[in-house]
Amino acid sequence: MNQSEKEKEMELVKRLMEKEAQAEKMDEVIKTNEKHLRHIEKSKKWQYAKPLQKVTGLFSNSKKRQNEYIMQLQEKLKETQQALNDSKEENRRLIMDSRKPDSNQIEQGVNTAKNNGNLLAYLSNLIRQKKEHEASYNYALRYAARVFMNEKKDFRNLVYASVMTGLKLEDIPEFMIRAGLTNDISLRPAVSFRTSLNMRMRQMQLSGSLPEWLLDHKMAAYMFADDIGIRRPWTSDRTYRMTDLPEKEGMVIKPADGAGSRGVYLVKHFNDIVDMKRSKKLDSWEELQSSMKQDLDSGWVDQDEWTIEELILEHDSQPASDIKFYCFYGKVGIILEIVRFPELKYCWWTATGERVRTGKYDQHLFKGKGVSLDEIEAASDISMKIPAPFIRIDFLRSGNELVFGEFTPKPGNYDEFDQTTDQWLGDYFVEAQGRLMSDLLEGTQFISFTQLTDKVNK
């Protein structure tokens, strides 16, 4: 069953569920009306009125009129009850969501607490309120699911699926997960790329190392690239102080221990130098050193240690664009294309060649050029040589090829993906863990990676 058919089926189940609920409610109303009529007919006033009806005939239609009057009262009662229910619902919402300050109020509150010296107390109170707030909603959602535990399967599954979208991974109760394993309920809300990477970071904190983090070191990454035959830029085998850098054209200057574009300079010519972080052109070596000094003084660059490497240009002396493959042990999940000069722009691609929005960089998107199927397959093959469920493999786009840049085990600001993308990449992560475990159990040998580990550990 494809996604469209599944959505249609869920919509039909939803309508059926609503109709049955309305029918049950109508049965209750009819029973209540009948009960009221029996009560009225047994009342003394009604019994006293019956002889008068026979004598005068004035009240020959009184029962009909009384029934009509009762129905009017019933209708009025229903309206009043609905208004009361609406009021109760609003009251419940206000109890669980009593404060919804905007971003300005939040920032002002935090800044005021900081300036008054009681930020920790403020945070403690804020955290308590957040936990209470979430606990109220979680209880309501889980209770709604429990109410349908013994209802019709289709109704129960629809309610479970709806409730699951409103709960965090750790808040989903076991009985819903159990139902997902035995029924047609998607457990996608139970996965998260953000959560998976967070747990991976905790693993590294507890164990002290993870395979992919060996490749976070530039020299180790280049050794690995050389061993598996990936084209990479030439690079110096030493580090330099700012004042000791060789004055050469056609090179890139980078912090020895840095990530991203901070402190990165493209020296095309001595009068044509690009400051990548500031997207700014520098006209002389003196301007370059002045900018590098600002990097150190501001803390953008931690230490006065720099490396140099080959400058890769795309075309017409333009800096190469970045192509970043989010790889999940043999599969490419998503691709980020970045143009950094003359302005910073981004484009996200799926592995099937579709441009998508992800919640990240939505204000700075452009229509990129994309990548070829061969390039996607090459990135997938590289990731299969690394015993880790996720690694980002970054390249530079030259005129006619991709040139390896670096491996990134933890992309910056990975928490900024929207929920749809986060869950989608979360599925990739979980699947990759499963494939990796199967390969390890079957005795797959990661020869190049093992050799790299031996070299680094010598």
Image (cartoon, rainbow, N blue to C red):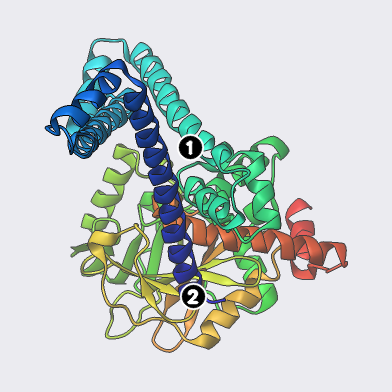
Residue plotted at (25% across, 34% down) = 74
Q: Nearer the viewer, residue 377 or 393?
A: 377
Residue 136 found in image quarter: top left
Residue located beneath label 1 in the image: 141
Q: From what the image shows, is residue 374 above or below residue 17?
A: below
Q: From what the image shows, is residue 51 above or below residue 65?
A: above
Mark found first going from the N terminus, 1 or 2 = 2
Residue located beneath label 2 in the image: 5
Q: Nearer the viewer, residue 41 or 150?
A: 41
Q: From what the image shows, is residue 299 above or below residue 19?
A: above
Q: Amino acid at mark 1?
A: Leu
Query: Residue 54 location, x and y as percent?
Result: 21, 31
Q: From what the image shows, is residue 136 above or below residue 82?
A: above
Tell me the SS state at disc 1: helix
Q: Do tag 1 and tag 2 residues touch (Cβ < 8 Å)? A: no
Q: Nearer the viewer, residue 264 or 448?
A: 448
Tell me the SS state at disc 2: helix
Residue plotted at (45% across, 75% down) = 4
Query: Residue 171 location, x and y as percent?
Result: 55, 37
Q: Amino acid at mark 2?
A: Glu
